[in-house]
Image (cartoon, rainbow, N blue to C red):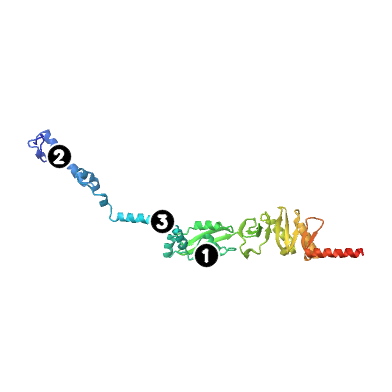
Amino acid sequence: MDGGGRVSGPLSPAGFPGATGPAARFAGQGLAGQGLAGSVLSRLPRFLRRSDSLRRGRPGPSMAERLPRGVGALGLSTAFGALALAGFVASGRYDAFVAENGRPFDILARIAGFGVERVTISGISRMYEREVLAAAGIDWRASVPFLDVAEVRARLLRVPLIASVSVRKIYPREIVINQVEREPAALWQMNGEISVIAADGTIIDTMRDDRYATLPLVVGDDANTKLGEYLALVAAAGPLADRIRAGTYVSGRRWTLKLDGVDIRLPEVEPGAALARLVELERANRLLEKDIIAVDLRMPDRVVVRLTEEAAAARAEASKKTKKGTAT
C-alpha cells in the first residue's frame, strides 16, 4: 500500500494477493470487461478512435495533414483567377471579345469542328438571305452544338414579313431554316413614309428598295384597312386599270384615283358606277387625253373638269377674243 492507503500494482487478478470470494470475482470481471472494451476499440476506424487518443493525451492529425497536397495553392490560384475574370467582365473587355470572336463555348466547338459553315434557307420570296441570317443572329462565330434553335426561331418570328418558321441542326456544321413569308399586297404611304402591307392592311415591311415597286399604292389615314375597296375600284376600271398609279383615301369617306397625273375624284356612294361613266367618256371623247389635271365625278348628273394652268389661260384668252369679236 502507498501512503494514502491505496494498492499500487498491475490491474490484474494477481494484483490482489490472497483475494478470494466476491472481491476476487468482481476484480476479475472488471478486468475482463476492460479487456473486451479494448478489443472493440482496436477494431474501430481510426477517425472514431481519435477521441480516445485525445483522452490518452495523444493529439490527432492536424487540418493541414488531412488535406491533400496542393489544395491551398489551388484555392489561392482559383481566387485570383475569379478576381481577374470579374475585372475582365466589368471592364467591358469580355463583351468586346465576344463581339469579335464569339462566346468561349462556341470558340471551343469551332476548334473541335462544329462551327456553322452552311445555312440552308427555304421559303424565301421577298427577303434576301443576308436579311434572314441577320435576323436569326447566325454568322461565322456561331457553333452547331450551342446554337439555341428556339431563340433563333423567336428572333425570326419577330420579322413582320415571316409568318412561320422552323429551325433545325444538322451535325456537324449545318443549320436548316424553313420559313413561310406573308404575301405583300400593296404599299401604304402615310406621313411621307411608305410601308408594305398584307391584304388585311397589316404592315409587314418597309419600302427600302425597288423589290416592291410594282405593288399598288394607297395613301392617307386608314387607307391600309380599306385596301379591298381600292383593289375593287382598280378592277372596275377596265381598260383604265393599267393607268392607275395610286389611290388616296380622303377624309375617311371616299377615294381619289391618280391616273397619269390626272386626279379622278370619286363619290362616297357608288364609286364603281362613277368610274364606269369615266370609262365611257374616255372611250367616246378621249377625255383624259386633253389638257386637264382633274375630273370630278362626285355629282351624278354632271362631270366637272379642271384644266391645267396653260390650258386654262389659253381658254381664257380665247374667250376674250370671242367676246371682242362679238362686240364689234
Q: On the rendered image, what quadrant is the C terminus found in?
A: bottom right
Q: Any mark on residue 87, and which?
A: 3
Task: Tell me where residue 186 sits by quadrant.
Answer: bottom right
Give the distance between the C-alpha atoms of the residues marked 3 and 1, in whole angstroms: 40 Å
Q: Position of residue 265 (x, y in %)?
A: 75, 58
From the viewer's perspective, tell me whether residue 7 is left or right of residue 197.
left
Give the distance between the C-alpha atoms of the residues marked 2 and 1, in whole angstroms: 89 Å
Q: Determine the residue located farthest toward the left in the rendered image.
A: 18
Q: Viewer-nearest of labels 2 and 3? A: 3
Residue located beneath label 1 in the image: 120
Q: Amino acid at mark 3?
A: Gly
From the viewer's perspective, tell me whether residue 228 is left or right of residue 287.
left
Among the two numbered marks 2 and 1 on one chain, the one whose residue lies closer to the N terminus: 2
Residue located beneath label 2 in the image: 31
Q: Residues within 10 Å of mark 3 (few under 14, many from 20)?
A: few
From the viewer's perspective, tell me whether residue 23 is left or right of residue 222.
left
Q: Position of residue 123 (x, y in %)?
A: 57, 62
Among the two numbered marks 2 and 3 on one chain, the one whose residue lies closer to the N terminus: 2
The residue depicted at 49 percent of the width and 58 percent of the height is 149
Q: Amino acid at mark 1?
A: Thr
Task: Tell me where residue 23 sits by quadrant.
Answer: top left
